[in-house]
Each structure stands twice: as structure tokens, then as C-alpha cells.
Amino acid sequence: MKILVADDSRVMRQIIIRTLRQAGYAGHEVVEAENGRQAVDLVSRERPDLVLSDWNMPEMSGIDALAVIRASGSTVPFGFVTSEGSDDMRTRAASAGAQFLIAKPFTPEVFAEMISAVLPHTA
């Protein structure tokens, strides 16, 4: 399985990758993007099985990237890992086609629960 992690913070990408490993996804390939525009490009080129994206990023936000990805016809499972988890953001994420939103701080257990609901055959 290939997982795309999109976040403008290199440190946060590393934290997310570490949390994925702790959640049981250690054996999977991880591709990294620094912003939404790179994420859109990598979804097209790399064909990941899952996208984990920050919401607020330079050049293109995560929610805008999701809109472009869905408009291209891609149905790749997409989840947000972001600092805010308001009801409004959760509603916007779901309306745009995201399967889940994980608010920081997060735990490996939350990652495992959310990802296994989307990709139950993995981990």
C-alpha cells in the first residue's frame, strides 16, 4: 500500500509517518508532499491508496487539493490530519469527499481506527 502524506511542515510529516508506523502501517510506502499542489500532482503520478493531508498549506490548501483530486475523477481515500476539528470543518471535509478528519493531537489508536474503516484489508 502507498500512503501520501501532505503537510507544509517537514516535522509534522515525520510525526504523521511515525504515528502511521505505530498504528500498524510500518510496511507501507510513504510519499510526501509539501503543499496541496504537490499532493494533486503526486496523486496523479503515484496513485496512492490513501491520502493524509493537512488543511492549511501554502500554494494550495488541503481542501482545495481534495476538490481538484475529486474533480479529476479520483476516488482515492482521503483524510485530513489538521490542528482544528470543528464541526464546520468536518462538514466541509465530508462534503468535499473526505472520509475522515483527525484533529491534532492524535494517537496511533485514532489513526488505526480511521484508516481501518477506509481500508479494512490493511494494517
Image: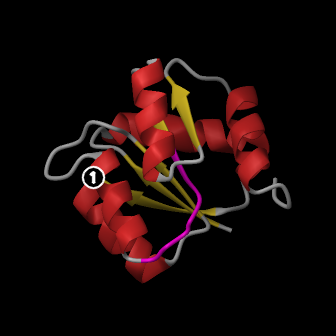
Q: Is residue 6 above or below residue 109?
A: below
Which segment is the magenta one? 73-79
Towards the viewer: 101 or 32:
101
Is residue 109 rendered magenta in the image? no
Towards the viewer: 80 or 122:
80
Q: Which residue is mark 1?
A: 64
Q: How many marks?
A: 1
Left or right, 18 with reference to 122: left
Left or right, 24 with reference to 68: right
Residue at the left extreme, as displayed: 59
Residue kind at label 1, given as amino acid type: Asp
Is residue 85 visible in this depiction of the protein? no
Where residue 106 appears, x then y in whole percent?
59, 22
Residue at horizontal 33 percent and vertical 42 percent from the top: 10
Where residue 94 appears, x then y in whole percent?
51, 42
Residue at horizontal 47 percent and vertical 78 percent from the top: 46
Residue at horizontal 41 percent and vertical 58 percent from the top: 32
Left or right, 93 with reference to 61: right
Residue at horizontal 48 percent and vertical 73 percent from the top: 74
Where residue 76 appears, x then y in whole percent?
56, 66
Residue at the right extreme, as displayed: 121
Quadrant of the frame with the N terminus: bottom right
Is residue 78 rendered magenta in the image? yes
Where residue 62 appears, x then y in whole percent?
33, 47
Secondary structure beneath dot 1 equals: helix
Is residue 39 visible in this depiction of the protein? yes
Q: Give the dominant element type of the magenta stretch: helix, strand or loop.
A: loop
Q: Is residue 23 above or below residue 29?
A: above
